[in-house]
Image: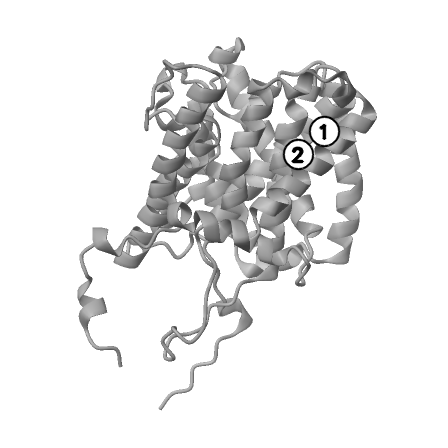
Amino acid sequence: MKLRIRTPAARTQGTGGGSAARSGPGQDAGRPVKVRDPFFDNAKYLAIVLVACGHAWEPLRGDSRAAAALYIFIYTFHMPAFVLVSGYFSRSFSMTVPQLKRLVTGIAVPYVVFEVAYSLFKRYADPDPGYPISLLDPWYLTWFLAALFVWRLTTPLWRMIRWPVPVALAIAVLATVSPDIGDDLDLQRILQYLPFFVVGLFLRPEHLQLLRRREIKTLSVPVFAMAMAVAYWAAPRMNAVWFYRRDSAQELGAPAWSGAVMTVALFGCSMVLVACFLTWVPKRRMWFTALGAGTLYGYLLHGFLAKGSRFWDWYDLPWLHTPEGEITVTVFAAAFITVLCTPPVRRVFRFTMEPTMEWAFKRDATELAPRR
């Protein structure tokens, strides 16, 4: 009889944005227990808070150069960090039946549900009664689910080729000079964010250990300060739409060659700031660690308030455009998305975010065989 010991490096974490590893009386005693790494839960929670703050700052940019600078600074790395972590936890994806089932229930189904819900919400709140419901044209936040579905399906391909990151970056460059790609599934974003997903696929725990060195953390402070200074300088001079990665250079009124330059430059800047961000993420369990399992809930649900605040003209209040108002908006956005990541909210919406859907799938032969 062999005794199998699970080392810390062998610990795994759920690949879905909201799925947590569970253990309890209902779990088969012969299965290894999955242990969540607090570092990645902390990283996902902090990144989703930055996402909410970025959306809250967007209407304030016109009246505040500081808000515009913070907006550019955050948008340089918060979604790249999310995409990179998603790639890291897609490393084991190999098209097995259980993985494909989770791909459907954890990504495809929430995409359909929230795309329909967002479209109906826009019809009601905008109001735009003629706004179409289209599963091929993601509205607002659902593009990430469509992208994650496509990226994860391509995971085996990236393991096969010899230079995956340069190839992914070349694809992103070609996307920025191709205005005819169109809006189907927000393909521009899928291709332009692809390099970060591929980098995540090939990250190893030892790479992340390098970020825990004290000298790296110390070096990140002047890097962050320099990035903020550059963002403050660029705020009135640069088109922030570049950071959305949803348009080609020609669609932004720029020459084609600038798309290639901006793609490579933004990729380099984003990777440096993602590394600086990760080096400051706590490695131990914190009060917000458990919320990292619910970041996809917070991401999708906060979109209704983020868009509703524009539809209902909440930002027309002059006080919100003062320093005190901007701070209040920031604190409220962080608190609101924190609540959306809590277990009670996840329990309420789990039927849409993590449906079991056993009725939709055939029983796999391995599941029917008696477990030893």
Which of the 4 image quarters holds residue 305? top right
Q: Is residue 269 visible?
A: no
Tell me the residue at 69%/36% (across/down).
332
Kindly identify which residue carries mark 2. Answer: 53
| In this picture, residue 197 sits left or right of residue 306 | left
Residue at the location (69% across, 58% down)? 212
Image: 327 above or below 315: below
Q: Which mark is residue 290?
A: none
- Front residue (pair 225, 23): 23
Q: Which label sits in the foreground, 2 or 1?
A: 2
Q: Give the spatial CA distance, label 2 vs label 1.
A: 10 Å
Identify the residue under disc 1: 70
When asked about the image quadrant of residue 80, the answer is top right
Disc 1 packing (10 Å; few <14; some 14–19; many ≥20): many
Tell me whether circle 2 and circle 1 mark residues in contact (CB < 8 Å): yes
Instruction: Tell me residue 326's x, y (percent).
Output: 76, 27
The residue depicted at 62 percent of the width and 46 percent of the height is 338
- The amino acid type, in three-letter code, at marker 2 is Cys
| Element assignment for label 1 | helix
> Can you give x and y, in whole percent of width and height, for residue 180 in the image?
36, 15
Q: Left of 245 or right of it: where is 208?
A: right
Question: Eyeballing the image, is 356 above or below 353?
Answer: below
